[in-house]
Image (cartoon, coloured by chain):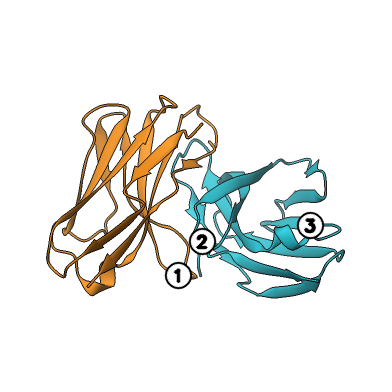
């Protein structure tokens, strides 16, 4: 079983739709969780950290479920510019070596 | 302002011809990483430096070497590139704080091997 698993997609949604991605992790000692966004042929960029209490940044909401060992990313009112690959990143407590998921591809169409 | 800079952005080399990729950072971060990323795959960690301490991943081929002459700079040397080494090479940095730390990535160098 891979340490961090994501559905590669693609998720193909119309503008304005709400879309959600999940990411499961296998290491129960994981402490830090992130969502990165990667545009085609560009570098990953931090979208948001995921806190135990969940967090929201505009149209984006991230949540953590420790019991089931997954994190989620919800995007409301999708924009064309949201089209990208969303990478789930997990690291265990005190570790500075994160583990990346392979990413979920989102395509938002008019 | 660019915080993690990679040069060149695009590198074309011939099969077996050594190539060096460079990375510099203005963040004064103590950890620097080199990743290899191929299409539709997760970034694969090749090695990282914690300060001056070099850490090689077990499955990183011997063909890949790295140097970190100072805090700001890090180099990736590919001694004899093969066709399978064509990929995006990403440099990243972080400042360790005892908890999970955000990584900052450079724009990457896209390597083509002819």
Chain letter for mark 1, please. Answer: B
Observer-nearest residue: A46 or A99?
Answer: A46
Which residue is at a point 20% across and 70% down the rendered structure image? Answer: B82
Observer-nearest residue: A81 or B48?
Answer: A81
Cα–Cα gap, marks 2 and 3: 22 Å
Measured as percent of width and height from the top left, residue A16 is found at 87, 64
**Residue found at the far top of this picture:** B28
Q: Is residue A105 above or below residue A32?
A: below
Please tell me how crowded label 1 is: few (under 14), some (14-19), or many (20+) other residues with Cα within 10 Å: few
Q: Are marks 2 and 3 in contact (CB under 8 Å)?
A: no
Measured as percent of width and height from the top left, residue B112 is found at 29, 66
Q: Is residue B78 visible?
A: no
Measured as percent of width and height from the top left, residue A40 is found at 54, 63
Cα–Cα gap, marks 3 and 1: 25 Å
The disc placed on residue A74 is 3
- The cyan-coloured chain is labelled A
At numbered mark 3, what does the secondary structure look like: helix, strand or loop?
Answer: strand
Q: Are marks 3 and 1 in contact (CB under 8 Å)?
A: no
Front position among marks 2 and 3: 3
Residue under circle 1?
A: B39
Measured as percent of width and height from the top left, residue A65 is found at 74, 53
Chain letter for mark 3, please. Answer: A
Please tell me how crowded label 3 is: few (under 14), some (14-19), or many (20+) other residues with Cα within 10 Å: some
The disc placed on residue A27 is none
At numbered mark 2, what does the secondary structure look like: helix, strand or loop?
Answer: loop
Residue under circle 2?
A: A3
**For this view, does A27 lie left or right of residue A84?**
left
The quarter of the picture where residue B71 lies is top left
Answer with mark 2 or mark 3, whichever residue precedes in sequence.
2
- The orange-coloured chain is labelled B
Image quadrant occupied by the C terminus of chain A:
bottom right
């Amino acid at each position: 079983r891979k340490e961090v698993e994501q559905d590669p997609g693609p998720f193909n949604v119309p503008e304005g739709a709400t879309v959600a991605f999940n990411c499961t992790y296998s290491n129960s000692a994981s402490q830090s969780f992130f969502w990165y966004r990667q545009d085609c042929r560009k570098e990953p960029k931090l979208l948001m950290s995921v806190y135990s209490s969940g967090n929201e940044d505009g149209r984006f909401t991230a949540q953590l479920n420790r019991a089931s060992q997954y994190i989620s990313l919800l995007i409301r009112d999708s924009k064309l510019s949201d089209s990208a690959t969303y990478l789930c990143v997990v690291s265990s407590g005190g570790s500075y070596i994160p583990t990346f998921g392979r990413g979920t591809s989102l395509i938002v169409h008019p | 302002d660019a915080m993690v800079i990679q040069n060149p952005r695009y590198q074309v080399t011939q099969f077996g011809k050594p190539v060096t990729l460079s990375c510099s950072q203005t963040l004064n971060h103590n950890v620097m990483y080199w990743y290899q990323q191929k299409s539709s795959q997760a970034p694969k960690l090749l090695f990282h430096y914690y300060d001056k301490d070099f850490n090689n991943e077990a499955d990183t081929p011997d063909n890949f070497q790295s140097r970190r002459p100072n805090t700001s700079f890090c180099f990736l040397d590919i001694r004899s590139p093969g066709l399978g080494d064509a990929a995006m090479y990403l440099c990243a940095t972080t400042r360790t704080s005892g908890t999970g730390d955000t990584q900052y990535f450079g724009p990457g160098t896209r390597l083509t091997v002819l």
